[in-house]
Amino acid sequence: MNKVVSLFLDRLAERFTALLAGVVSSRVEGLHAVAQAEQQSDLEDLARKYEAEGKAEIAMTLRQRAIGLTSSNLAAEALDVMQQVTGEPLRLSGPAAADSTADLRGLPDFGQTPARGRNKRQRPVDGDNINDAMGEPS
């Protein structure tokens, strides 16, 4: 009887988890769509402003960016961001970046495993007996 109740509660928990995840996902997608629409509207307003000032190239660039914002697949966007973040090594800028390895010349190479030395037994010093050290009679 306990096993049946436990199985029922496990499945019920799975269903609630799936429902909750669906609600959260749809809410996030809605918020994302609203933010995208606001960004597109702002970019279009800026494009009109620059077009009125005679800066047609800037207006065209802004409109292209607004078109590039439309995406319905949040998971693909997140995957692209993660690949960009983790795929390339960090690039440091500034004068220290060009010579960053010069400061590390004195440090050991921790990438290699150290060679193991031989296990030498310690011999008793000054006539000490190993059994005396362990408290055993000789």
Image (cartoon, grey):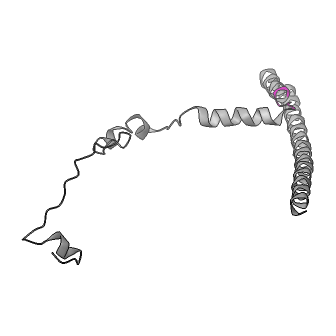
On screen, 85 above or below 57? below
Q: In the orientation shown, which residue stands out farthest toward the front?
A: 138
Quadrant location of the N terminus? bottom right
Task: Give yes or no for residue 133 being in the magenta stretch.
Answer: no
Residue 120 horizontal side relative to residue 65, left or right: left
Residue 29 figure quarter: top right
Residue 63 figure quarter: top right
On screen, 38 above or below 4? above
Residue at image x 52%, y 35%?
A: 91
Quadrant location of the C terminus? bottom left
Q: Main secondary structure of the magenta part?
A: loop
- Residue 87: x and y in percent read 60, 32
**Count of residue discs:** 0
Task: Give yes or no for residue 68 being in the magenta stretch.
Answer: yes
Residue at image x 17%, y 69%?
A: 130
Q: Which residues are magenta?
A: 67-72
- Residue 62: x and y in percent read 81, 28
On screen, 114 above or below 4? above
Judging depth in this view, the residue of 117 and 3 nearest the camera is: 3
